[in-house]
Amino acid sequence: MDFRFNWKISLFCLVFLVIFMNLGLWQLDREKEKRELLAQREELRNADPMTADELATREDWIGRPVRLVGEYDPAVILLQDNRVFEGQVGFEVVQRFHESSGRSFLVNRGFVPIKRTRDELPNIPPVTGEQQITGLIREPGKPLLLGDSTQDPGYPRIVQSIDLAQLKAAGLDVFPGVVRLDANQAGALPRYWPDVVMQPVQHRGYAIQWFAMAFAISLAWLFFSFRKKEST
């Protein structure tokens, strides 16, 4: 076998070898981060539920379980747009909840499918009377405009996301988080709320693919660099 150095092929293979290796290592780092994140969320989820009074004195409430006692407000319902559940397009129902402590919360009850047109409001099962509910409290997400507060379109209102500042300007003073209602609670609707979009095992799979491509590019360099001796 003769070694024939070709600087163009060698440079090409080296560049892509470094890229593929770095991408594989990055995916392994993402796997580690996801496992740590899921462990932290599981630890929070297993903590004792906080009450409304306890939430008012804490700043580290994101991701914690809560227990509220009160009534759903049928007059204030937000429909978060562009949600998909099991292939159906629809909304997530976010309803105000009057807690017995005197505070108000936004509770995400889950998914309802859209009707034939967006002009028709979806069917939202009512919940009446005092309820004790549990759920996980999360940040509302990046706000988008709800519309001109001086021309209130009424409720239920279709929104892209929750804007707490505009809600407060419209006279709705609620806790700065959204309670994702547990599945077995009064008023619960179908939902799909994974902790992460991509599971750790998927990052491991992508890492293996990148390392396999690095191995392939190494074999390609060997193939082009070593040739059989030509017979004389």
Image: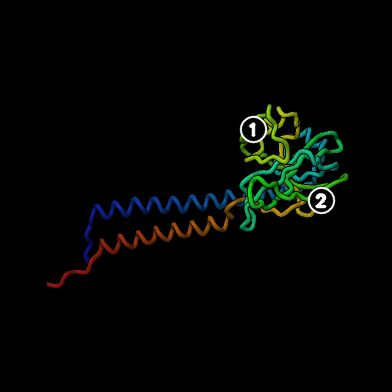
Label of residue 147 in the image:
1
In terms of depth relative to the viewer, which is nearer, 51 or 183? 183
Question: Which part of the image, by quadrant, shows the C terminus?
Answer: bottom left
Dot 1 falls on a residue whose secondary structure is loop
The three-letter amino acid code for the residue at tag 2 is Ala
The three-letter amino acid code for the residue at tag 1 is Gly
Q: Choose mark 1 or mark 2, whichever is in front.
A: 1
In terms of depth relative to the viewer, which is nearer, 166 or 38? 166
Q: Is residue 212 above or below residue 188?
A: below
Dot 2 falls on a residue whose secondary structure is loop
In percent of width and height, residue 127 lies at: 82, 48
Task: Give the residue drawn at x 70%, y 27%.
Answer: 169
In percent of width and height, residue 76 lies at: 76, 38
In percent of width and height, residue 135 lies at: 76, 47
- In the rendered structure, the answer to whether residue 145 lies left or right of residue 21 reads right
Task: Give the residue drawn at x 49%, y 57%.
Answer: 206
Q: How was the colour assigned to the protein in this rendering?
A: rainbow
In percent of width and height, residue 113 lies at: 67, 53
Category of crowding for the residue at label 1, using alpha-carbon neighbours closer than 10 angstroms: few (below 14), some (14–19), many (at least 20): few
Residue picked out by circle 2: 186
